[in-house]
Image (cartoon, helix red, strand yellow):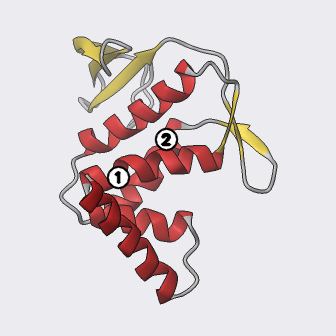
Amino acid sequence: MQCPKCQASQVKVLDSRPADENRAIRRRRQCQVCGHRFTTYERVESLPLLVIKRDGTREEFSRDKLLRGIVRSCEKRPVSMNQMQEIVNAIEADIREAAKTEVSSTDIGEEVMARLPKVDEAAYIRYASVYRRFEDSTVFLQEIERLRQKQSEE
């Protein structure tokens, strides 16, 4: 393991504990050269999962890419990083439990769209505006109305 700050390889583990509902191990580490502290996660390596994008191309599923999209939609909102990571964990677990080796980006987007309103409605609207490619204010208002209808049904 290398320190992300100084790239030294003299790193010690300070703390280890289960994470992600026992599907990973979280390790707190400290560089013995510069003193920088950082966290790493160990996960079981599984079969590569390919995402079929809208244009038909395929790329490997990236937890980080999914998390970045959710983080962008939750910027300046009262949503913790833990809540965002839980969404990513749940989506990845659902996909892997289905035992598929390929999944469409549309399916992933719909999973995010199903979970975000429960966490933060404004973040949901932000995500939807990019995911559904809102062209004008009418589409934006239709999405807000759809969200209101879902809430009244629940």
Q: Is residue 24 left or right of residue 97?
A: left
Q: Which label belongs to residue 22?
A: none
Could you tell me which secondary element the residue under label 1 belongs to? helix
Asked if 153 appears above or below 20 in the picture, the reply is below
Q: Is residue 35 left or right of residue 46?
A: left
The residue that disc 2 covers is 64
Q: Amino acid at mark 2?
A: Asp
Asked if 52 appears above or below 12 in the picture, the reply is below
Front residue of this view, candidates 118 and 84: 118
User: Residue 37, percent across and down?
Assistant: 25, 30
Q: Looking at the image, can residue 75 be seen?
A: no
Q: Earlier in the sequence, mark 2 or mark 1?
A: 2
Could you tell me which secondary element the residue under label 2 belongs to? helix
Q: Is residue 57 left or right of residue 141?
A: right
Task: Locate residue 123: give its quadrant.
Answer: bottom left
Q: Amino acid at mark 1?
A: Leu
Front residue of this view, candidates 58 and 148: 148
Residue at 32% x, 44% y is 84
The residue carrying pointer 2 sits among few (fewer than 14), some (14 to 19) or many (20 or more) residues within 10 Å by Cα, namely few
Residue at 48% x, 44% y is 111
Task: Locate residue 27: give its quadrant.
Answer: top left
User: Residue 135, percent across and down?
Assistant: 58, 83
Residue at 55% x, 28% y is 95
User: Residue 69, percent across and down?
Assistant: 47, 54
Mark 2 touches mark 1? (CB < 8 Å): no
For the N terminus, which image quadrant?
top left
Per the model, the C-alpha gap separating discs 2 and 1 is 17 Å
Residue at 18% x, 58% y is 78
The residue that disc 1 covers is 116
